[in-house]
Structure formats: structure tokens, C-alpha cells
Image (tube, rainbow, N blue to C red):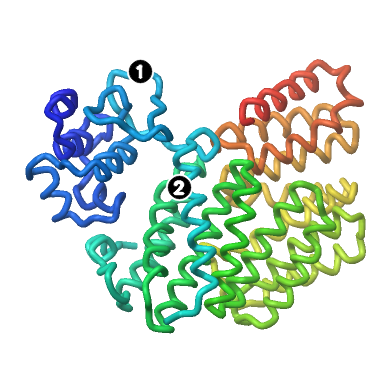
Amino acid sequence: MQDALDGWHIGRVIQAYRTHPWHGRPLSQGTVAAWVGLNQTQLSRIENGPPTQDLAKLIQWARVLRVPARLLWFKLPADAAAEPAPAATIQPAAPSPVGDAVNRRELLRVMSLAGSLLALPSSSDLDIDRLTAADRGGSVGTATLDEYGRLNGRLWHEFARSPSKLQALPMVRRQLDVLTGHLQRSQPASTHQRLCTLAGDLFQLCGEILFDADCYSEAAQCYALAASASKEADAPDLWACAMTRHAFIGVYERRFDQAAPLLDGAADLARRGDTALPTRHWVAAVQAQTFAGLGDAVQCQRALETAALVTELDSPAATGWLRFTDSRLDEERGSCFVELGRPELAEPSLNEALRQRLSVRRRGGVLADLAAVGAQRNDAEQTVLYGGAAVDAARQTGSTGYVGRKLSLLQPQLKPMLADRHVRHLDRQITNLTTTAN
């Protein structure tokens, strides 16, 4: 790597990066090329051709590979010149939307541009070559749009399986940049509609990542853009889901009165959508949480009954942006009853939820709710048992946006039991967890 840098040849730097032992096995040219919208052939020319003199391209690659400014033979702009701590080798790092100002600015730039473009009228294996070699100078073909859809699905899959949700952000941002680039150009009406659908899908994923990182303002912008894109695409189910996710921000910030009107609108949209999809059932589940937060047990129960009708669907869809199935009913019920202060109703549902196969993130939420059940009963042993397990789950996820929020809400309930040294230890654990995250 050092020899490549000393040679002032960005192509050789890229090649050294791709083949560095840190990756375990070499990264393909196609994979690395896709990071900046090139294809394998174009990257091969950069690696094997004469040194690139184009400063804009040099800066782009330096940012993508996260090469420290002190090692470069050219000067980075002021906003990209911040150097990481010295290291023996250049190693890829998962960017943080909180700590990486450049990545955050770039995301906001794409979001701002997309928001303007959406207001204008229209004028498991991925085909990476098709994705990266699409003609950006004209309309997009149907096959390319299909590949974009498959890529969106893959990104949702990676988000779901990744312990740290922030790891999915760089690829999501790059794909949003590609879609926005297509939206800037004149497209047939049907192509414009498909692009809006893809953008609405991906902005929801971006919002999920930022929400989990406690970046609520940025997440809200993503959900608002997702709603605009879905409206432009005339996709009521996608639109309803965007509004429901936006409402989540109010639910988790305990601004239930702000969440309620968004959910009313989402419910109206869901009634216009595909009856084979569980959109209306998911909206009802979130409405149940909102009614619970408002202390309306009757309306909460009615909403839970509507959510439970998902069991009557033949095979509820579990796409990236719509993943509500009957497997979520127990944890939804349990969470609502915890909010209503009904531990005797919450505990059976939460225990049933724990028997299911849950992600670390969802399991952490259920454990935090069971700890709250213990606190409501003034049962220090149960509170510590489940609260400690929830803290461990939050640490495993690498972020505290979801589980950490539930644990933060648990802390005030610990005060009556702080004479118990185990409860005091749990209280310190939660404080350390949430303080470190912030």
C-alpha cells in the first residue's frame, strides 16, 4: 500500500486496497467499482492505465477508500481533510452519521436534490455490470430498473441481518445518488414512476438506519421524502408505510399527539392499497402503541384487534419496506400493555414473543419490556434479570436507537428499587450505554 501511495498512482492504491489481507479475500473490481458508479472495465483501466490527473476523481477515490490526508500527494478540501488516528494500515471503517461530517453532508445533499426533483413532473444474484454500466445519459431500461429493485431488496436484507445498522448506510447512500441521477434526466412517464417507487423504498431504509442511530431529524427528512416519492409513484401502500415510519418518531419521543394524525392519514392510504398486503394491519399496530401512550385502553384494544386480522391473509408479504406478520403480534400486544401499566396482561404476550425466533434488536426490545413489567411489580429480581439481558442486546447491535430508548424509559421506574445494589448496577449500565451512544 505504501509503495502504491509513494507512486502517486490512484489506480495502484485501489488495487492495493482491494487485495489487502485485511479483507480476508480480495475484493473484486466489480464490487469496488460499484462504490463510485463505475463498471469493472472502467476500474481496470484506472488500475492499469497511466496515473489519473483529474483532482476531482482523486478526491472521490480518497474519500471512498478513507485514505488519511497525511498519506496523499494531493490536498483534500477542508471538509474532507480530517484525519483518523494513525494506523499501520488503511482499514475500511463503518461510517457514522454522527461522527462522519462528510458522509452526513453528502446524504443531506442527495436528500435535498431528490426532494426538489420529486416536485417536478415526469417528461438473490445481482447483475452488477448492468447496475453500474447503465447509460446515465438517457432513459433507463426495464431490465436495469428490475436490477435496481433487486438491489434495494438486498440492501434491506443486509440491514436486517447486520448487528450494527450503520454498516448499511454507505451503500444505501450511493444507490440513492444513482437513482437521483436518473431522476435529474428526462424519462418516460412509466420509468419516472418506477424510479420514484425505488426512491421511496430506499429513503425508508435510509430513515430506518438513521432512526436506529438516534438521528431523528435526518430520519424524519428521509421519511418525508419517501412519502413524496411514493405519492409521485401513486403507490399507496409504500406511501402509508413511509407515513407510519414517520409516526414512529413521535411514538419513541413520546409525542403521541403528533403521531396520531400521521397514522390517521396512513390508515386512509392503506385502505386504498392492495388488500393482499398487511399494510393496514401494521398501521393499526402502531396506532395501538399511540393509543396506549395516550392512555386510551379501549381504542388501543380495537387497534390491536385490527392488527391481529393479519392472520387472515393467505401469505402476508415480508418485503423490505413492509415486514409485518403475525409473528409480531405478541410483542406489539406486550409493549402496549406495558405502556398502559397492565403487567398481568403484558407478561404472557412478551413471554410468548421470546419463544419466537427474533433478531437481536427485537429480542432486546422484548427483554426491556419484561424488565419494565418487573419494575411495575416492584420485583427487583425480574427487573435486573431482563434489564441486564436487554443491555447486552443493545451492545450487540452496535447502536442504541431502539433498545436503548426502551431502557432509557425504564430508568425512572428503577428509582423506588435503588436500595438494591443489583438495581443500582443496572441503572449504571443503562447510563453508561446511553451516554456512550450520545
Percent x, y for residue 68? 32, 27
Left or right of 223, for residue 158: left
Percent x, y for residue 218? 60, 49
Left or right of 335, for residue 20: left
Left or right of 263, for residue 220: left
Q: Which sits in the foreground, 40 or 123?
A: 123
The amino acid type found where label 2 is placed reads Glu
Q: Quadrant of residue 69?
A: top left
Callout 1 environment at 10 Å: few (<14), some (14 to 19), or many (20+)?
Answer: few
Q: Which residue is mark 2?
A: 106
User: Is residue 180 depicted above or below 428 in this figure?
Assistant: below
Quick one: quadrant of the C terminus?
A: top right
Query: Which residue occupies 11% across, 49% down?
Result: 45
Percent x, y for residue 165? 51, 44
Indicate the secondary structure of the residue bearing disc 2.
helix
User: Is residue 169 depicted above or below 153 in this figure?
Assistant: above
The amino acid type found where label 1 is placed reads Pro
Quick one: quadrant of the N terminus?
A: top left
Q: Which sits in the foreground, 220 or 162?
A: 220
Percent x, y for residue 175? 39, 57
Query: Which residue occupies 15% across, 42% down?
Result: 52
Q: Quadrant of residue 431?
A: top right
Mark 1–mark 2 distance (CA, rounded to whole Å): 25 Å
Residue 17: give its label: none
Which callout, 1 or 2, points at the residue further toward the start of the chain? 1
Q: Which residue is mark 1?
A: 86
Q: Which sits in the foreground, 4 or 436?
A: 4
Callout 2 environment at 10 Å: few (<14), some (14 to 19), or many (20+)?
Answer: some
Query: Which residue occupies 76% across, 46% down?
Result: 253
Q: Quadrant of residue 336?
A: bottom right
| Front position among marks 1 and 2 | 2
Query: Which residue occupies 69% across, 29% down?
Result: 388
